[in-house]
Image: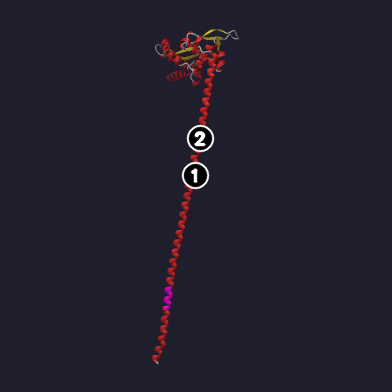
Amino acid sequence: MKTIKEIIKATLFVAGEGIELENFSENLNIPLNKVKKAVEVLKTELNNENGIHIIQYKNKIQLASNPKYVEQITKILNPIREKALTRAMLETVAIIAYKQPITRLEIEDIRRVSCDYALNVLEEHKMIEVVGRKEAVGKPLLYGTTDEFLKRFGLVSLNQLPNYEELMERIAIIRQDENQSDNLYNDFKLQDLSAKQEVENQDLSKIENQDLNKVENQDLKQENLNQKDENSGQEINKNINEEISEDLNKEINKNLSQENLINQIKELSGNLEPKKEADAS
């Protein structure tokens, strides 16, 4: 029960308008009698001095402020609302001031948007009022400004309003200046962005060229190192070959010397042997 009650209260707070009891029952899969019991509990909790009450009409329930605090709420909110006249409200009351008496449809035809909310707020602030009905199909309401409007804008009478045609000319000039200003600003931003993009492209190109040069230099350095290594290898091989050749020549010469020495010994031996034979004979 407590969970159902809190869900109902939270939903009513978010909705801000009346909700049928059946919606809670159907969407939460809760029997209708349980929903009604939860609502009764809420009514008991939110009563007397509580700032928020639950009101019920037909088969709907809704959160509402406590009627006992209407005066205090009005004193707090009215000044805030009066200061917070939106542009739509100002446009609406200006149209009424210059074109009164005027109907809602005629105001909307000028503004090209719905003005129901603006009219309601202006009526609450007592800045406009219904001054009659237009002799047309449906007899729509005619709106006009009030003394509160004059007081709010510091006017003695409507005669002190600026001339309508002159005002329209001034507004047209202001809008034209704003459009030109916007165009100049946009052009400047576009040029600025283009220049910035060009600089970025140039910087990127420089970086790419630098990187390419670095790569080429590295390749060239590596090629030089390889060439040096190759030359060094060739030089080493040359030195080794020369050393081998030198050693080989030495060995050959050594062998030749040994052979010559042997031959000389043989020759000397040969010369000595006959001489011995001669002595023997």
* Residue range corresponding to the magenta coloring: 253-260
**Closer to the camera: disc 1 or disc 2?**
2
How far is mark 1 from mark 2, CA to CA?
21 Å
Residue type, label 2: Ala
Percent position of residue 65, x then y: 44, 13
Residue type, label 1: Asn
Magenta: predominant secondary structure element?
A: helix
Q: Is residue 271 visible?
A: yes
Q: Quadrant of residue 104?
A: top right
Secondary structure beneath dot 1 equals helix
Would residue 257 be counted in the magenta stretch?
yes
Q: Quadrant of residue 281?
A: bottom left
Pointer 2: residues within 10 angstroms few (<14), some, or many (20+)?
A: few
Percent position of residue 251, x then y: 42, 71
Q: Is residue 213 above or below residue 78?
A: below
Front-most of residues 7 and 208: 208
Pointer 1: residues within 10 angstroms few (<14), some, or many (20+)?
A: few
For disc 1, the marked residue is 209
**Numbered disc total:** 2
Quadrant in which the N terminus appears: top left
Q: Is residue 114 visible?
A: no
Q: Which mark is residue 36?
A: none
- Give the image's coloring scheme: secondary structure
Of the image marks 1 and 2, the number of the one nearer the N terminus = 2
Q: What is the residue that sits farthest to the bottom in this orientation?
A: 281
Q: Which mark is residue 195?
A: 2
Percent position of residue 258, x then y: 41, 76
Q: Is residue 73 above or below residue 29?
A: above
Percent position of residue 145, x then y: 51, 10
Would residue 164 be counted in the magenta stretch?
no
